[in-house]
Amino acid sequence: MRLWSLHPSYLDAKGLVACWREGLLARKVLLGQTKGYRNHPQLLRFKTQTDPIAALDQYLSAILEEAIQRGYAFNPAKIKHHPSHFSIPLTNGQLEYELNHLKAKLIQRDMKRYEKLTQITALLPNPIFILVKGDPEPWEIVLPLKTNIRERVGS
């Protein structure tokens, strides 16, 4: 399960669809409607909120908004609008780690989007997150890239 902290506009089609589906799975987990993934570390940031479902729905609404802008047919009835607004802290180290993780994926499947990501000067998170200084989140399993990204693209 990967619930990207990055702004959804950075995701390629495959990443955006996967994030939506995994977010909906996470929603079922939080509702107690599935046996798997109950202790998945990426759910911790939602579980600690006063209303975990509302927080996850707010997260997913940004995914949905991006999908609509791209003309995708995501079903908005899968999530609910809640009056509460959440601001979940996210470390800049986590955001940077995810950017590099996404870049490694995009080299394999969407070189144009990869090139766009290399031009970013101010990295944005999903709107539910508020950036704070720090290393990758403690729940993240930080894996080194197998090869340097520059080597992969022949720079």
Image: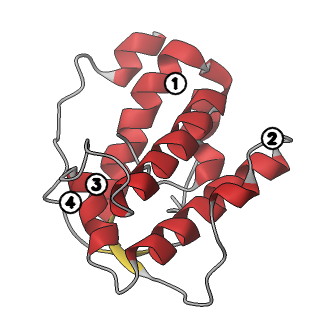
Q: Position of residue 51 (x, y in %)?
A: 40, 82
Label 2: which secondary element = loop
The numbered mark at residue 106 is: 1
Read off the residue under disc 4.
137
Tell me, yes or no, whether the two marked residues, 4 and 3, touch with CB atoms within 8 Å.
no
Q: How many marks?
A: 4
Q: Are marks 3 and 2 in contact (CB under 8 Å)?
A: no
Earlier sequence position, callout 2 versus callout 1: 2
**Labelled disc at residue 42:** 3
Q: Nearer the viewer, mark 3 or mark 1?
A: 3
What residue does disc 2 label? 73
Pointer 4 local density, CA inside 10 Å: few below 14, some 14–19, many at least 20: some
**Residue in the picture at 74% in, 49% down:** 75
Q: In the image, 48: left or right of 54?
A: left
Tell me the kind of residue under disc 2: Ala
Q: Which numbered disc, 3 or 2, marks the residue that appears first in the sequence?
A: 3
In this rendering, the label closer to the viewer, 2 or 1: 2
Query: From the viewer's perspective, is residue 115 above or below residue 154?
Result: below
Q: SS at mark 1?
A: helix
* Circle 3 crowding by C-alpha within 10 Å: few under 14, some 14–19, many from 20: some
On the image, the x and y values in percent for residue 42 come to 28, 54
